[in-house]
Amino acid sequence: MSTPNPEKAPRMRPIPSFIFASRWLQLPLYIGLIAAQGVYVFHFWVELVHLLEAAFGSQTALQALISSIGYKSDVAITSLNETIIMLVVLALIDVVMISNLLIMVIIGGYETFVSRMDLEGHRDQPEWLSHVNASVLKVKLGTAIIGISSIHLLKTFINAANYDEKVLIAQTAIHITFLLSAIAIAYTDRLMAHPQSDSH
């Protein structure tokens, strides 16, 4: 006995169909973000190679690291020290966290605003993607930005001697602003997801 065919979706009128199809204009944007992530991967490996070379005594790699992290000292630096290693590692973690942010924007944004990716049942499907929507994506992006801001702030305070006091205050204020904004977004999302029951 044959099973009945599922009902077909009604055919859209030309103008609504054209407007709905315009979502594919976002595809080049996500492809561009993938290219940007490739640049971050390249930058990560360049910094990692410099760190390894400096650990084995390369002065050229050491100077490249010092220049990239903006580290300054009154004494000539001829070998790695704990501060430089920490700043470089934090910079690498920063790249990883930005890469995670890019993945969330690329996959979550494409799934939410462009087209389904049909990842249901795939063993590598991100856990957060199963219930992603615009509100969830905003909260996750806000949390990721706070993490990135925290790394930047930690790098600044470790290397505080090379920064003006105004810069330290400004970065702290910006981080607090990010934190309060994320809390406000999460609270608003919670109110929208769980509206208070009407009183009788």
Image (cartoon, grey):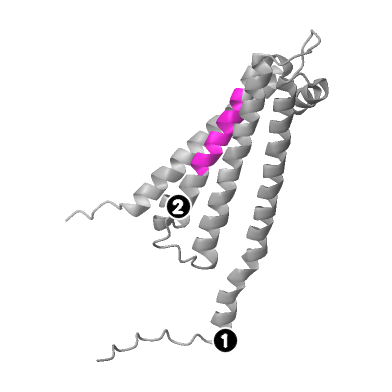
Q: Which of the two labelled residues, at mark 2 and mark 1, occupies the earlier sequence position?
A: 1
Between 189 and 47, the residue placed more toward the observer is 47
Dot 2 alpha-carbon crowd within 10 angstroms: few under 14, some 14 to 19, many 20 or more: few
Spot the residue most to the top: 75
Quadrant assignment, res 132 = bottom left
**Overall secondary structure of the magenta stretch?**
helix
- Determine whether, in the image, residue 76 is placed left or right of residue 110: right
- Is residue 112 inside the magenta stretch? no
Q: Is residue 156 visible?
A: no
Mark 1 Cα shell of 10 Å, populated few (<14), some (14-19), many (≥20): few
- Residue at image location 71% in from the left, 43% down from the top: 42
Question: Residue at label 2?
Answer: 126
As measured in the structure, the alpha-carbon distance from the residue carrying label 2 to the one carrying label 1 is 36 Å
- Amino acid, disc 1: Pro
Q: Which mark is residue 101?
A: none
| Residue at figure coordinates x 55%, y 66% from the top left | 114
Residue at x 71%, y 46% (from the top left corner): 39
Amino acid carrying label 2: it is Pro
Residue 143 makes an appearance in the image? yes
Q: Which residue is mark 1?
A: 14
| In the foreground, 173 or 68 | 68
Q: Which residues are magenta?
A: 142-154
Residue 149: in magenta span? yes
How far from the left and from the top, in percent, is residue 101? 56, 45
Residue at the outermost left position: 200
Give the structural element (helix, strand or loop) at label 1.
helix
Quadrant where the C terminus is found in the figure? bottom left
The residue nearer to you, when weighing 119 against 36, is: 119
Q: Which image quarter: residue 14?
A: bottom right
Of discs 2 and 1, which sits in the foreground? 2
In the rendered image, residue 180, in percent from the top left (x then y), is placed at 49, 35
